Structure formats: C-alpha cells, structure tokens
C-alpha cells in the first residue's frame, strides 16, 4: 500500500519567473492545483475497460429506470403488473446504477493510481466484475425472480443473481488487492499526492466494507426470514461503502475544480488531512462489530450514526474552498463547459439530498428523495470526471452542445424528481410501493408523484445523453487513432 506523504514535508512554490513584474492579469492566480498525471500505459488501458463496464451498467440501469418511473407515474402505472414488475425493476436499477456503476468508476480511479505492476490481476478483476454484471442483468429472466428490497444492496433471491453478486464482489476484492500492491508513491506533498491518497483511501474503505459483509455473513443465521437476512447481511458493509463514494466524490470535485482553472485556497496538506479524517471513520466499523452483535439494535444505530456524523466531516472544507474559488471562474471553452456543469450540478444535488435528510420522518418517499440527491451528486461528479479523463485515456474530448447541456439536463431532472418525492412524502406517500399500492388520495399527492415522474423521465434523457456523448468520444478517438 502506498505510504502517506509526510505531513512535515515543505511544499515550496516555484521560483518567480523573470517577468514577475508583468501586469497582474498575466500572473497565475494563487492557490493549489489538483490533478493526476495519466501516462498512456497498461493501467490507463485497464481504466478504459472499467469505464466501458460502468457505461454498460448505466445503459442497463436506464432501461430499468424508465420502466420504474412509468410504474409510479399516475395515468401510466395501471398498465403494468405492478407488484413484481416494480420491485424487480427497482432491484436491477439500484444495483446497476449505484453498486456496479460506482465500483466500476472506482476501478477507473484505482487503475489510474497504479503503475503497471499486477496488470494481469487487474484484468482478472475486470473480467469477474463484467461476468457478475451480466448475471445481475439476466437474473430476472431465469425463472423465479423474488425481489428483496433490502437497504444498500437489494437482491433478486435466486441463484443466478446471488451468484452474480458474489462473482462481482470477488472481482472488486481483486481490484482492491491490486491497488494496494501497485499504487504509485510520491515523496512530494502536492495536489497529485493528495488525490492519490484519497483514491487509495477509497480502496481501503472498500476493503473494510467487504470484510464487514463477510463478518455479517458468518454471524447471522441463514434461516432468518429473507428480508431480515439480507437487511442484516448488507447493513454494516453498505454503510461503509458510503465512505468510498464520498471520498471519491471529493476527489472528483477537487480534480474538476482544477481542470476548470480554479485555484483553491486549500493546501494539499489540508486536503490530505481532510480525506484522511473521512477514511479514519471507517475503522470504527470493526469496533462496532466487536462491541455489538449484527442483529442488535445498538449495531444498527451505531452504523447509522457513524455514516451521518463521520461521513460529513470531510465535506465542508472542500466544498467551501471550491465555492469560494468560483468567485473568479475563468472563461469556459467548449471542453470545460461540461466539466463546470457536472461540478455545479453535483454540488447542488448532493447538498439538496443532505438537507432533505433532516426532514425525514417516517417510512415515506422523503427517504428515497434524500438518497437520490446524494447518490446523483456522486454520479454527476463521476460523469464530469469521465469527460475530463477521456482525452487523457486517448479518446476525443467531449465538446458538443449536448455534452454542455447533459449535466444540467440530468441534474435538473433529478432535482424535479426529488422535489416531487419530498412533496408527496409530506402527504405520507410510502416508499418502495407503486401502482395501486401507492393509494394516492388527494390532488396534491397525484401532483407530487406526477412531478416525480416528469423529473425522472427528464433525468433518464440526461443519463442517455451522457452515454451518447461518451460513446461518441470513444468512437471518434478510436477513428482518429486508426488514421
């Protein structure tokens, strides 16, 4: 595993150039820069493979998301066999759009943080994750498809889905092991070292999450009722994975801000310390497991408190530094507009999701509004970082109007989606139900869920636009290389 750069290392600014007395507008603004050098080596090619897997997962998720939104939209919901249809679509949508997409993009960043050692191990990890993803997609078509809506990782309770999930987890474990083995090290404490440490820290958090899943599996009885079994199985590790997403989102924010030409009033030393604090929180998890049984109320509550309070410690310093730096945002060209849209929409959606969390009371649709905001905030950060990384991986840079509008389309649709959920939640509309089970009694409830449906459809269009932009950039880059 990479060594943590020394906090006592002095980071000296370069000597002033000969034209130091040039007009102020010609000087580079003061502040730290964050970014990672991406050499065109085997690790970069592996990163491109992980990105392709993530894009494929988003395509599958989009199909299930469209069906999911239609199953909840007034006027359309009665056209579907709701009970099983809605729940199976929900399981597939959540696992593809969160678990597979997020861990695939983590694979992109883990690969870029590594040199070429262990490349065969990295390829094996990618193949396993791809095979597991295929199994997750086809599981609903293989006979009995019983959806279990457990938190964090909902499942379809059949052998194909559960086997695919296990294969995917094995691939992630190999990717984490390769990251620890092959991570590049740096003696200088600069912005690149801080981002590398954050990426490696996300791999540490993922390793702790996998250990938590294993610990829960060994401790709980397989004879429990299936909903209770999977809820307990994924509760601890699912909470730890939220630290993985948060750390990688913060890495994405810092990287995108610097790609836009912003100079952050946040030194690499402070950024590294903040990311370390976020990582340190995950090591409370083994203490919780040792102190309380997995099935206990105390275990359940302590994991929730850890995520709620520990996970938020790292966000304000980085968020405030980025917002402050935006006061002097440089002019945006065609290549930077998609990056700015993704960064701004990511911050806005994540903040909206966090604020909604304080309004939750009871098992209503305010809960999915909360986590949709936070999850979409992470997704938008990854989308923007994907745009920025494409030319570094040898493909074309997204410069089209569609690329510039895509983050706003996706983010705006998701904002309408969660506003509709919050509105409906205020009238007591329950979560994880659809169709006739929703029992929409008043025009206000119908309007709220209608706004949810409209926003969801717009967000699906925005997600499709992202896939189109990325595939177009991949194809243009491949065509240019062929010539």
Image (cartoon, helix red, strand yellow):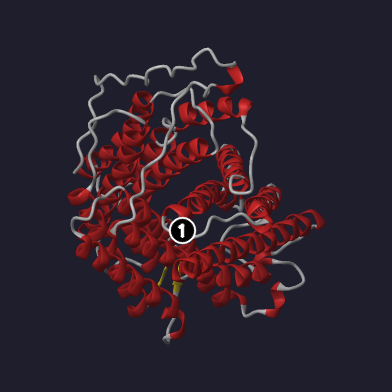
- Residue farthest toward the front in the current orientation of the protein: 18
**Is 294 above or below relative to 298?**
below
Would you place residue 298 above or below residue 398 in this image?
A: above
| Camera-nearest residue between 362 and 435 | 435
122 vs 188, nearest the viewer: 188
Residue corresponding to mark 1: 98
Q: Is residue 434 above or below residue 178?
A: below
Q: Is residue 173 left or right of residue 57?
A: left
The picture places residue 145, in percent across and down from the top left corner, at 44, 80
| Residue at the (32%, 40%) spot, across then down | 196
Dot 1 surroundings within 10 Å: few (below 14), some, or many (20 or more)? many
Residue 130 lies, in percent from the top left, at 35, 71
Q: Residue 346's image quarter?
A: top right
Q: 256 or 20, which is in the foreground?
A: 20
Which quadrant holds the N terminus?
A: top left
Q: Position of residue 225 (x, y in %)?
A: 36, 67
| 439 lies left or right of 97 | right
Q: Residue furthest bottom?
A: 143
What residue sits 71% from the left and 66% below the top? Answer: 73
Can residue 153 be seen here?
A: no
- The residue under the point 57% across, 22% down is 26
- Apparent side of residue 24 relative to residue 479 in the rendered image (left or right): right
Left/right of residue 344 with respect to residue 240 in the rendered view:
right
How many numbered marks, from 0 up?
Answer: 1
């Amino acid at each position: 595993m990479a060594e943590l750069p020394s906090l006592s290392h002095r980071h000296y600014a370069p000597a002033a150039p000969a034209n130091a007395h040039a007009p102020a507008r010609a000087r580079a603004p003061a502040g730290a820069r964050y970014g990672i050098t991406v050499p065109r080596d085997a690790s970069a090619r592996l990163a491109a493979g992980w990105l392709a897997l993530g894009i494929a997962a988003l395509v599958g998720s989009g199909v299930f998301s469209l069906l999911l939104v239609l199953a909840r939209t007034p006027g359309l919901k009665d056209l579907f066999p709701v009970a099983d249809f809605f729940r199976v679509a929900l399981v597939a949508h959540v696992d593809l759009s969160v678990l597979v997409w997020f861990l695939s993009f983590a694979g992109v960043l883990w690969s870029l943080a590594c040199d070429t050692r262990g490349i065969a191990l990295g390829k094996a990890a990618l193949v396993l994750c791809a095979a597991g993803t295929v199994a997750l997609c086809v599981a609903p078509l293989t006979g009995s498809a019983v959806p279990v809506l457990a938190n964090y990782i909902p499942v379809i309770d059949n052998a194909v889905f559960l086997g695919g999930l296990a294969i995917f987890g094995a691939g992630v474990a190999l990717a984490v092991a390769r990251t620890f083995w092959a991570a590049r090290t740096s003696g200088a404490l600069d912005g690149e070292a801080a981002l590398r440490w954050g990426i490696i820290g996300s791999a540490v958090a993922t390793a702790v999450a996998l250990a938590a899943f294993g610990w829960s599996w060994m401790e709980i009885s397989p004879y429990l009722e299936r909903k209770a079994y999977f809820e307990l199985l994924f509760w601890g590790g699912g909470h730890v994975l939220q630290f993985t997403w948060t750390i990688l989102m913060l890495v994405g924010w810092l990287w995108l801000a610097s790609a836009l030409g912003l100079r952050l009033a946040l030194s690499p030393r402070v950024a590294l310390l903040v990311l370390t604090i976020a990582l340190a929180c995950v090591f409370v998890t083994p203490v919780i497991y040792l102190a309380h049984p997995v099935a206990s109320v105390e275990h359940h509550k302590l994991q929730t408190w850890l995520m709620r309070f520990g996970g938020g410690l790292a966000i304000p310093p980085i968020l405030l530094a980025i917002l402050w730096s935006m006061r002097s945002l440089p002019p945006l060209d065609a290549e930077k507009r998609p990056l700015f849209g993704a960064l701004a929409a990511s911050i806005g959606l994540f903040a909206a999701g966090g604020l909604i969390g304080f309004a939750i009371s009871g098992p209503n649709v305010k809960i999915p509004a909360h986590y949709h905001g936070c999850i979409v905030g992470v997704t938008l950060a990854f989308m923007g970082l994907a745009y920025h990384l494409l030319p570094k991986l040898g493909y074309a840079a997204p410069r089209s109007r569609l690329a510039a509008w895509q983050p706003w389309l996706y983010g705006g649709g998701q904002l309408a989606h969660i506003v509709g959920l919050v509105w409906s939640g205020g009238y007591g509309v329950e979560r994880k139900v659809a169709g006739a089970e929703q029992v929409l009694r008043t025009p206000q409830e119908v309007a709220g869920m209608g706004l949810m449906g409209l926003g969801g459809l717009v967000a699906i269009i925005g997600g499709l636009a992202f896939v189109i932009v990325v595939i177009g950039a991949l194809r243009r880059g491949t065509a240019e290389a062929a010539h």
